[in-house]
Amino acid sequence: MSQNQTVHFHPAEGFAERSRAAVNDAHLRRSFRGAMDFLQAKRLSQFPDADELSALRDLGKAIRLHALANLPDLLEQLEAKLQANGIQVHWAETPDQANAIVLDIAHRHDAKNMVKGKSMVSEEIGLNHAMEVAGIEALETDMGEYIVQLAGEAPSHIIMPAIHKTRQQIAELFAAKVPGVAYTDNVDELIRIGRDVLRKKFAAAEIGLSGVNFAVAETGTLYLVENEGNGRMCTSVPKVHIAVTGIEKVVAKLEHVALLNILLPRSATGQAVETYQNFISGPRKPDELDGPDEVHLILLDNGRTQAYADVQLRATLQCIRCGACMNHCPVYARIGGHAYGTTYPGPIGAIISPHLLGLEATYALATASSLCGACVEVCPVRIPITDILIRLRNEAQAASAGKLRGGGRARKPLQSSIWLVWSWIYGQPWLYRIVSWLMSRGRALAPSNQGAWTRSRTPLNPAPQRLRDLLRRPASG
Amino acid sequence: MSARENILGRLRRAPAGAPVPLPDVAAWFATTPVEDIATRATRFKANIEAAHAEVHETNAADWPSLLLEIAVQKGLGRLLVGHGTAQAEVLRSQPQHQLKLVSYEQPAATWRSELFENIDCALTAARSAIASTGSLILWPDASEPRLMSLVPPVHFVLLDAANIHADLHAAMTNERWAEAMPTNALVISGPSKTADIQQTLAYGAHGPRELIVLLCHRGAKSS
Amino acid sequence: MNPSIPRPYPPKPANAYLFATCLIDQFAPQAGLDTVSLLQREGISIHFPEAQTCCGQPAYTSGYPDEARIVARRQLDLFPQAWPVVVPSGSCAAMMRHHYPKLFANDPVLYAKANELAGRIFELTEFLIHVVGFKRVDVGGSCTVALHTSCHARREMGVHETSAALLAGLTQVKVVRQARAEECCGFGGTFAMRHPDISAAIVSDKVASLKESGAQRVVSADCGCLFNILGRAEKIDQSAAKGTPSLPGEHIASFLWRRTSGGEA
């Protein structure tokens, strides 16, 4: 990481405070609970046949596994095909490199205005900030992203960025921030206001920036899905289109997209299909009357190769960013996306962020899970999220630094000693017998204050006699 | 070392996992029961209507008058048509009507404000369609550019019912997309929409508020 | 590994081991006694290896695999006969059945041992339904209960149906479904200690949904969840100065035994 890194996340510090504030925010709790219930029910309605879903998930996983197993080859094939199609390909190891590439393109076109389709990778690299510093207006055009940007916030969900906001809050925001707009909490009206503002921006922007849902190596195609049409605006109105994506988003075959897009919209928002599937395989041809003159793709690493280097953690990169894991997560439902402090919240955020930001900074997220497995149950590509969370906990507390950035840094001497003593007691039956006997005999001495446990619960007290004592007594009939 | 070499180098140095065979996606789609044209058309219609599109069943002879009738009903004044397309010619040859036809002949950059502000609706053909998701397939080109299906608030689409595939995979393989992709291929499954404000569905977010499909059946069937 | 793939079940054995779990041994022995009563009544001799301690899950999920291995290693040798091992906890059963092989993946000898043991680990309700063919007459009065299934029982063991099936076999018991029944109770072992605010928020919602369901009591096949849910409910009662518990509950083994044995525990 270079010195002038634009993104500064310190989720490990402050996660407890942020999550406490979130669980005590009744408003936020209601917003998320309502949204999660809605999304869970919608997803379920799209997968009525459990066996079919299971087979689909197997195939989805196989496609992503195949892509990852052949990742370097597929990236080279993708690059060659894109270039043959007239799309310029750039590689970036860090957020700074990615932003520098965007700025370089922007400067070559004297660009001052950029319209953006929804792109979590652009959030990841802090692109808006980098553009602002360089005097370029980078305007979010997805309605949710636009709302969040207008409020000076970050997305709280990877698919539904403004999920934490109520209609009334958005109405107040528009009335305060959009010139000439009176308060209305009518959703159609609010959307019309956003549409009118942004239409002018689409027509004026020199650069359109987007993410990529899948990049097809076989044909050199960038595949983007969306409902609003802003993504299509960004990729077809301005004279330059820049797409940014992580290196893991490649798939081998065009037909793989057909299968993955059965899983993606259903898992994400419980809709059968998105309104727009946009296959981009080149800039406009000389005789075409619209479309960008230039198309660029930036392939970003930013720690993904670290995940890739480990056979178990590589599964993290199977992700197709549907957000189903967060929609079903009991922790995410209670604290929302902002408490995580990372671009990607929820279960997927907890397992991808350590590679982007280092394990030291993100360890708290890996522990913020009851390992209930709801995420694993719904993941359309079967990422073993809970196993990966356990692995990250191991790496963070390991005695040696290991291979992950920030590994071993969460190890605390007192805590390690406690577990060591625990392993002695439970690892030696005679010692366990003595300790557990002492506990049951001394139960009157059991503390009524058991720390974090008794803040919300009554104390847990040993029984007067252990099961092993009771079983040793002759049956009383 | 360039970023490219560094990234590829790290990926190539990573331990190989278990080999993964190319997934047989075709086999999955092959399990879909084969349907006749009429069944596919029915399924297409039901699905795209569920996504808030209007579908009018018509035929090759009647669609122009139907379109004009709908346009009048909706109070639409200016219709954007493609340059030198058969459907534009057919509309032009219709007897007198209220609708003013605007032809997309110049690069968008030269008349962008007009395109964004003064066009009520557009008509394009669909290359084909998809039954399983109720989707239209458009391959915009020089005669029917991509913004026609995006910028005007109402989008009329002419679809030949014989060109409806079972699913996206069938469309890709039957039409052999992978052999030569166009610069832009679109799969459109309804009018533009958003649920970004408190999960409340609203139409016409950035693209067309209304998507009106003129589904042309071959043979005698007429609306 | 995939709970949707049914595992083979042996015929009802004459002997079985009990791995009671450390929680039951120290904190809820009645659930262990009732487990033994239920199984012995079916003609199965129950063997309780005295050297058993804990499955090792607390350390395993807290990021201390070496410490987990030390403890788990001890349990591997406790069940020398080829008898089934019955575990009255979905969570601990899942640990032994699914995670032991992973824990010892790097040691061929111990891996083989862990794998062999994993193959005969049965969660109690799973064992009662699929191996014992449990069918006993309900002799209790009418009552309304809600079932809370632990996440590990549900998602790793795929046995949430077996607890439900046992309750469905009790003719005088009405089972009500609480809202978001499949959601975690917020226990998660050390998660409850490490993130007490989030855990408290989750368990408070769970207690509320159980109360709203109209159930007179909650039953579960996992003591960890029960301690969490009942401890939270009790704490709420205390602050409301309520004498009688507003949400009583017990292990499903105790509930089953009481309902089918004439009321005596």
Image (spheres, rainbow, N blue to C red):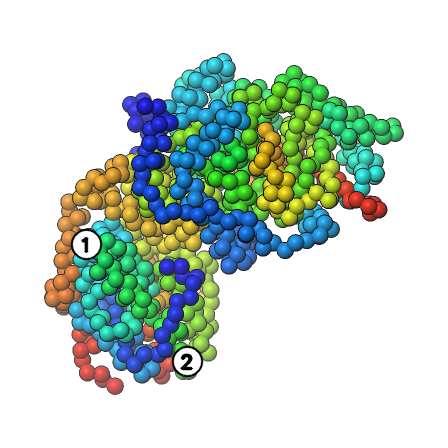
Instruction: Check the picture and name the quadrant holding the C terminus of chain C.
Output: bottom left
- State the image coordinates of residue C7 (x, y, percent, origin top left): 39, 67
Q: Is residue A467 above or below residue A50?
A: below
Check residue A315 in the rendering and tell me which mark sits there, or answer none.
Answer: none
Give residue A451's position: percent from left, percent from top: 23, 52
Discs 1 and 2 lie in a common subunit: yes
> On the image, which quarter does residue A310 sit in?
top left
Seen at 25% across and 39% down, the residue is A403
Would you say residue B12 is visible in this rendering?
Answer: yes
In contact (CB < 8 Å): disc 1 and disc 2: no
Q: Secondary structure at mark 2?
A: loop
As helix, strand or loop, the secondary structure at mark 1 comes to: helix
Q: Report the chain holding disc 2.
A: C
Amino acid type, label 2: Lys
Left-right relation of B174 to A262: right
| Local crowd size for mark 1, using a 10 Å CA cut-off: few (<14), some (14–19), many (≥20) | many
Q: Is A138 rendered above or below residue C102?
A: above
A184 or A321: which is nearer to us?
A: A321
Q: In whole angstroms, how far apart are the C-alphas of marks 1 and 2?
A: 41 Å
Please, which residue is most extreme toward the right here?
B95
* Residue for point 61% across, 35% down: B186
Q: Looking at the picture, tell me which residue is in the foreground, B195 or A244.
A: A244
Kind of residue at badge 1? Glu
- Left or right: A442 in relation to B20: left
Q: Which residue is mark 2?
A: C135
Whichever of callouts 1 and 2 sits on the residue coming sooner in the sequence is: 1
Q: x and y percent of residue B191 in the render?
A: 65, 38
Residue at (33%, 28%) from the top-left corner? Answer: B6
Q: Nearer the viewer, residue A217 or A177?
A: A217
Disc 1 designates what residue? C67
